[in-house]
Image (spheres, rainbow, N blue to C red):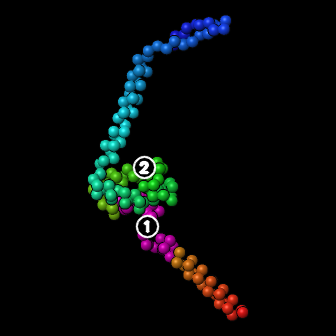
Amino acid sequence: MTRKAIQCNNKLIRVPILSFNPLLFHSSKIVLLWLLLHPIAIAISSTDLSSEQAQRYHNLLRELRCLVCQNQSLAESDAGLATDLREKVKTMIIDGADDDEIFKFMTERYGDFVLYQPPFKPQNYILWIAPFLLLLIGLTILIKKVARQAHGK
């Protein structure tokens, strides 16, 4: 870079002289082109689904759990893995997979945890039965306590 010496307050200061750099100019054209075309590419890629497929896509995303956020569906999550899984679901829908095939793929790869409605099978019995057992135990304790108080008076 060329510099020019100028005098300021009786001091000699060297300042850079801006010159045309063809490589920098070419790079800025590439960045500008990318900034202009990127939104168009996103718009085109998001219209790959028909209205029926889009409805299925959104329903599936609401039924699948984000593995990173754990308390959000794939539709709600902004995690990187959720983005990848959304793209995988979309690709599978475009390729003609039905909902059961998509659920099967997800559970084989990530386990039943990925489903908001886990299936009723031996590994998950505790998930389905525990709330009712806890309610039954709580009601039993409450009834015994009320019965003791009634007999104690």
Going 40% across and 29% down the picture, which residue do you hit? 31
Residue 117, picture quadrant: bottom left
Q: Give the labeled residue for mark 1.
A: 117
Whether residue 40 is visible to the viewer of this picture, yes or no, is yes
Q: Position of residue 12 (x, y in %)?
A: 63, 7
Instruction: Residue 38: give x, y in percent of width and height.
Output: 37, 37
Disc 2 is placed on an element classified as helix
**126 shown above or below 25:** below
* Residue 3, position as x, y percentages in the image: 54, 10
Q: Amino acid at mark 2?
A: Thr
Residue visible at 42% across and 69% down in the picture = 119
Element under label 1? loop
Q: Is residue 53 left or right of residue 20?
A: left
Query: Which of the marked residues, 2 or 1, is nearer the chain's N terminus?
Result: 2
In space, the residues marked 2 and 1 are separated at their CA atoms by 21 Å
Callout 2: few (<14), some (14-19), or many (20+) C-alpha neighbours within 10 Å? Answer: some
Q: Nearer the viewer, residue 62 or 10?
A: 10
Residue 106 place in picture, x, y as percent: 40, 59
- Left or right of 128? Residue 40 is left
Give the residue displayed 72% in from the left and 92% down from the top: 152
Indicate whether 37 appears above or below 111.
above
- Specify start and end residues of the magenta stretch as a single range: 102-129
- Residue under the image location 47 percent in, 50 percent down: 78
Q: Amino acid at mark 1?
A: Gln
Q: Which residue is mark 2?
A: 83
